[in-house]
Amino acid sequence: MSDITIIPTKQWYDTASISETHRRLLAEGHHVSENALRGWVRQGILPAARIGRTCLIYYPNVLKLLHEGTGMPPEASDKRPPHIPPRIAI
């Protein structure tokens, strides 16, 4: 007799937390950091639903972002972080 153990494959859900989505991306060969996902959600690049402190993201949206990008990059003067003062024309 052979002692073969069959390990079931992980079942993934299309809507999941950032950390779970990160694990799925790694399992499927996409090398994206968890911090990158969090940053995209924070910047509004990747839509997310918030439930308390948990952000849920839709996996097909992540794949679309990875394959198609965000389009044209914004101009440098369009969005400035609040800690950077406005440009002064000289």
Image: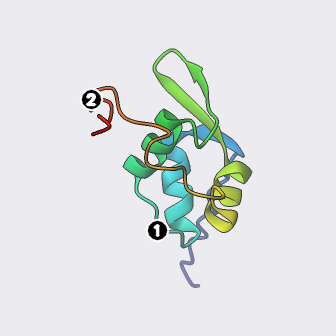
Give amino acid for label 2: Pro
**Disc number placed over residue 85 in the picture, else none:** 2
**In the rendered image, the vertical position of residue 47 relative to residue 71, given as above or below:** above
Pick whichever, 36 or 4, lies toward us. Answer: 36
Q: Residue at x 57, y 78 (%)?
A: 4
On the image, which quarter does residue 2 sit in? bottom right
Please indicate whether residue 89 sits to the left or right of residue 12 in the image.
left
Please indicate whether residue 43 sits to the left or right of residue 82 in the image.
right
Pick whichever, 8 or 40, lies toward us. Answer: 40
Secondary structure under tag 2 reads loop
Q: Which residue is drawn at 39% across and 36% down?
A: 80
**In the rendered image, the vertical position of residue 63 relative to residue 17, given as above or below:** below
Q: Residue at x 40, y 57 (%)?
A: 33
Q: Could you give the CA–CA distance between mark 2 and mark 1, rounded to whole angstroms?
A: 35 Å
Give amino acid for label 1: His
Q: Residue at x 73, y 52 (%)?
A: 60
Pick whichever, 59 or 23, lies toward us. Answer: 59
Could you say where residue 63 lies in the image, as x and y percent from the top left? 67, 59
Secondary structure under tag 1 reads loop
Contact between labelled residues 1 and 2, with CB atoms less than 8 Å apart: no
Q: Sort mark 1 into few (<14), some (14-19) or many (20+) by Cα contacts within 10 Å.
A: few
Quarter of the rendering occupied by the N terminus: bottom right
On the image, which quarter does residue 82 sit in? top left
Residue 37 visible in rendering: yes
